[in-house]
Amino acid sequence: MDLRILFSRISHWIFRRAIPLKLSYLAVLLAITATVSLAQTAPLAITVSGPYSFKDTPAVPGYKVTVTNTSQGIVSSIAVSHVLSASDGSYLITAQPSQGTCDPGGQGVITLSCSIGSLNPGASSTVDVAAQMVSGDVAFSASATGFDGSGASFSTAPAQRTTLHGNPPAGTTVVSISLSANPTPKDLVGGRSGTLSWNLQNSNGIAANQLVFAMVTDNRMSIRSASVAGSNSTDPVSCSVPVPGDSGTNVVFCNIDYLGGSSSAGGGGGGNGTVTQLQVNVNYVAPIVSAETTLSSTGYVSFDGTDSSNPAATGQVRVKP
């Protein structure tokens, strides 16, 4: 056979089989690319700080949800969803965002959404959430949706914290935190201003980290401002108050990175054995009522890795008509 004819036949055979082979390789490559695209990491990172346990219930655990843009583009239309799972009627009381707005909470509410808008690269936003823990364990979770810098929609996996009814898990560091309330003055004419004070103290030399202090006051009181003073001025703390005049439950949140402990623990704090305390002052305007009544104020403190065995302190302010 002519070599030119043989070469032509062999070339034709290779070409006929190479095309399907190339196409199959291309299909595999496209599938892999699609899989990688679907598995891309969401541009937001979510963390949740909150209590491991409360020995005594009912109680009001406070959770701090931090949303951070970890991408190189602006993330927009961010919605953060909060879900509380329980079997005893526990519910979400309220949520206060550092930016944006949140749906109202209340009895029977177990899902609550917050719209926090956009975050620039590296920027963070927080949402403080108070829950009513009735008698058993609760599981709190937070997740987010939005659009990344290229306009593609995304959703994050939920970040969760379970709060137990009882002692903390075995091996958990136990920190002693005392909380006392000092509402002054006790008698107040309706319409006049007053101050409620809470004292938070850690005296055992072990740092309490990531404290969330939720102070629940009578919703007839108009909360105006909150200030913090302490024996250790380097303790990082920030407090948020409800918008004056807003209806619903009044909750003042304070987020404290650490309280007490050695100078190397928790990023700072007082020396070992040194009493480290903070005083939170909440300024309010009393309601005008038609008869003498009693207003209540309750504070709860919760923090990571500790025994919140004495979380509650109560105080009362009487309002004269």
Image: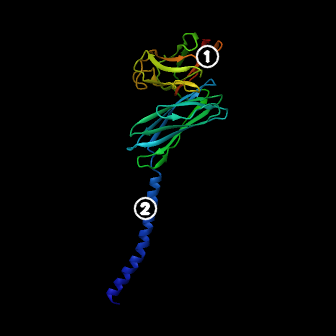
**Rendered residue at 66%/32% (across/down):** 89
Looking at the rendered structure, the kind of residue marked 2 is Leu
Q: Residue 143 has which mark?
A: none
Q: Amino acid at mark 1?
A: Leu
Crowding at mark 1 (Cα within 10 Å: few <14, some 14-19, many 20+): some
Describe residue 108's horizontal placement relative to residue 44 as left or right: right
Q: Position of residue 169 (x, y in %)?
A: 57, 30
**Toward the viewer: 78 or 237?**
78
Residues at marks 1 and 2, CA–CA distance in whole angstroms: 68 Å
Q: Nearer the viewer, mark 1 or mark 2?
A: 1
Q: Is residue 249 visible?
A: yes
Query: Quadrant location of residue 248?
Result: top right
At a point 60% along the width and 16% down the height, the residue shown is 288
Q: Position of residue 264 (x, y in %)?
A: 40, 24
Where 9 falls versus 108 (above or below)? below
Instruction: Residue at 62% x, 34% y: name it.
Output: 109
Mark 2 falls on what kind of element? helix
* Quadrant of the snapshot with the N terminus: bottom left
Comparing 28 with 120, the one in front is 120
Q: Secondary structure at mark 1?
A: strand
Occupied quadrant, residue 86: top right
Quarter of the image with the C terminus is top right
Mark number, residue 295: 1
Which residue shows up at 47% across the image and 51% down it? 39
Q: Which residue is mark 2?
A: 29
| Residue 68, horizontal then vertical, whole percent | 44, 38
Asked whether disc 1 touches disc 2, contact meaning CB atoms under 8 Å apart, the reply is no
Pointer 2: residues within 10 angstroms few (<14), some, or many (20+)? Answer: few
Quadrant of the rendered structure where residue 261 is? top left
- The answer to whether residue 168 of the structure is visible from this angle is no
